[in-house]
Image (cartoon, grey):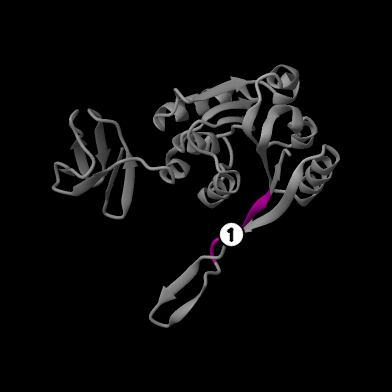
Amino acid sequence: MLLTGEDREYLVEPGEELGTDLGVLEVPEDVEPGDTLETHLGTEFRVRRLRGPDLFHHFERTGAPMVPRDVGLVIGETGVGTGDRVLDAGTGTGVLAASMARAGASVLTYERNPEFADVARENMALANVDERVEVRTGNVVDEVDDLATERFDVLTLDTGDAPAVVERAPELLVEGGFLAVYSPFVETTRVVVETARESGLDSIVTRETIQRELDVDERGTRPSTAPVGHTGYLTVARRE
């Protein structure tokens, strides 16, 4: 759960002690969202339940995680929901895998780096989705033959060798299943699209994920010059 106050936010567990320059806070075992707690110096913190967008800020990172707006695009474009089986490759921090699990899906995700995979497993426990997400260490390309016998509703890829998996997507997906490939580079995206076409996938669409934040103050409203608007390219396709 989160403790918020004084323009700060801390992730804690019930029964833990939080020590900051604002004072020491003993978090009760029976704490509930909505409770207000005080440090020994009298600073108040509000207890809040950990929500999906909070994962981006509080997961232990092993690289650049997928930002919430891109996670939302993947879920919205593929319709991931309760009862779906998802095959995910390029786990990384695990924000996407955890978010799809919180939407009700069962996720099998592959991470090639053993240390990154261990961190992802810890993050799944933090998000309370470790029963719905299986993090496997390895390269999904090497497992395609075995995985093709299982069939998945959605296939999500955030890895440099995505085209090699896209080539086998028709074997991995159920009829009408979705493929979503995220890449920060145009070059990889082009190969993904070409491979999806050659593989016979349908409804192939690629979009740049870009968003502008607005600055609103007494002078007026205009796009902010500070945040980075572009994050990557998302290709979505479907098995006929």
Residue 201 location, x and y as percent?
Answer: 77, 41
Q: In this view, does 147 lie above or below 25?
A: above
Provide the secondary structure element on which disc 1 rests.
loop
Find out whether residue 227 is within the magenta segment.
yes
Q: Which of 117 and 69 is in front in this view?
A: 69
On the picture, is 73 further left or further right than 199? left
Residue 210 location, x and y as percent?
Answer: 61, 59
Q: Is residue 78 above or below residue 131?
A: below
Quadrant location, the C terminus: top right
- Location of residue 176 by image quarter: top right
On the picture, is 84 further left or further right than 6? right
Query: Can residue 106 be seen from the camera position used here?
Result: yes
In the picture of the structure, the residue carrying the numbered disc 1 is 228
Q: Give the range drawn in magenta.
A: 226-234
- Location of residue 3 by image quarter: top left
> What amino acid does circle 1 point to?
Val
| Residue drawn at point x = 49 percent, y = 69 percent | 214
The 10 Å Cα crowd at callout 1, few under 14, some 14 to 19, many 20 or more, is few
Residue 46 location, x and y as percent?
Answer: 22, 47
